Image (cartoon, rainbow, N blue to C red):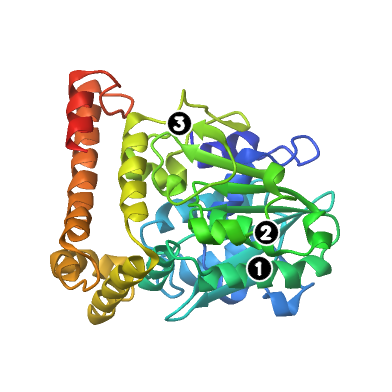
Amino acid sequence: MPNLIDYVHWRGDLSFDQCPVGEVDELLFSQLAYISFGPFVPTLKLFPHYVTLQSAAQRLLEYDSEGKRIHQHSFMWKNLRTLLETCAQAPRYRDIPLCAYVDELTEETQFAAICFLLPGEMNVIAFRGTDDSVTGWKEDLLMALSDPIPAQVRSAEYLSMLSPLLTGKLLLTGHSKGGNLSVFAACKADESIRSRIDRIANLDGPGFSRALRQSLDTADIRDKVRIILPESSVVGRLLEQEENISAVVEAKALGLLQHDAFTWQVVGNRLIRAEGMTPYSEYMTVVARDFLNSLSETQREEFLREVFETLSHMDARTLRDAPAAFFSALPQMVKSLRTVDKEHKDKVLRLMVDLGEAALRTLVSNIQKKGKELLPSPGSKDASSIDKDA
């Protein structure tokens, strides 16, 4: 089935005058933001210097075609490289100026962003989502707390520094954590910047903790935010989203794997609409939210502290190094929680079991139906057993 790369083959010969930037372009730019361009795209400090997409692609791929000399995100690089190569040859994308590139990875912060200068004074600012670093996933866990994570703070600073240097409208986009950052940055921007924002694309990005959401001023941007989710979204439904979902789209993958934007289905210049969220998504969302809402802020902080301590002892920089050690240590982490009573400890373990069972049910259903990934429909015998188990 057709995806982002097919879209470039189909529409890559059309200029932005012939076919204005749309929702598939927003998704495309959000994926290009995952690429580590290294020294081949000028930084924010070097603005207004830029390179074309074709030039950046050529230099990067000549230097590091395998994505090993400059750290690329191993689980995404194959698709990202193909997308970059295809865009570099397409008249629609190859001459786009790339500038204001920022890529930061410390023990506390995983943040990256890039600006694409489109014709007609439309500036696309794309925020990178979570990469395969342990730091990135630490920040994701911290989103459950009331304070902004470091990447959110950096996104607001980046937008406030870059926007005055640009002329024309602003289009903010991001996938996963990048979608969350695009909304946060807009909320923190001055009125002079907000008025220039044409729209904000939050592509399967999580919401905010209740306390943080209540502290954000969303009045001027609420109507500009477009939330697009795959039909079995889990990540994009975590925490609280104040804005309504703009579109639910089809994806060719199982459950959580639909978070991969390259599985989202495309026709023409649009993402293919699904009938609605699958029962799998609804079930996983209820389970995760109920668990988070059952914990106080102090209990959340303690649980996350234990998670971070485990991660730090694993001597792992990327998730590829970490999963086995993390999950083997999970029961001990739960037992070590001092302020959480037995009922809440049991809920943590039950959460892991429920998520695993839901994923298994999805896999079995998909194999049986050889088609759309769905859990049993509401009212069915299997669905009743799920509700009972939950």
Q: Identify the element where label 3 is drawn.
A: loop
Q: Looking at the image, tell me whether mark 1 or mark 3 is earlier in sequence order.
A: 1
* Location of residue 348 (image quadrant): bottom left
Q: Identify the element where label 2 is drawn.
A: helix
Amino acid at circle 3 = Glu
Instruction: Using the image, tell me which numbered label, if any, was put on residue 187.
Output: 2
x and y percentages locating residue 370 in the rendered image: 26, 24
Residue under pointer 1 = 156
Residue under pointer 3 = 250
Amino acid at circle 2 = Cys
Q: Quadrant of the N terminus?
A: top left
Who is closer to the viewer here, 12 or 382? 382
Mark 2, Cα crowd under 10 Å, few <14 / some 14-19 / many 20+, is many
x and y percentages locating residue 217 in the rendered image: 68, 57
Q: Is residue 120 left or right of residue 248?
A: right
Q: Is residue 383 above or below residue 143?
A: above
Q: Is residue 241 above or below residue 180?
A: above
Q: Residue at x 53, y 76 (%)?
A: 104
Q: Is residue 389 left or right of residue 163?
A: left
Discs 2/1, front? 2
For the residues labelled 1 and 3, say whether their Cβ atoms are less than 8 Å apart: no
Q: Quadrant of the C terminus?
A: top left
Q: Looking at the image, tell me whether mark 2 or mark 1 is earlier in sequence order.
A: 1
Mark 3, Cα crowd under 10 Å, few <14 / some 14-19 / many 20+, is many
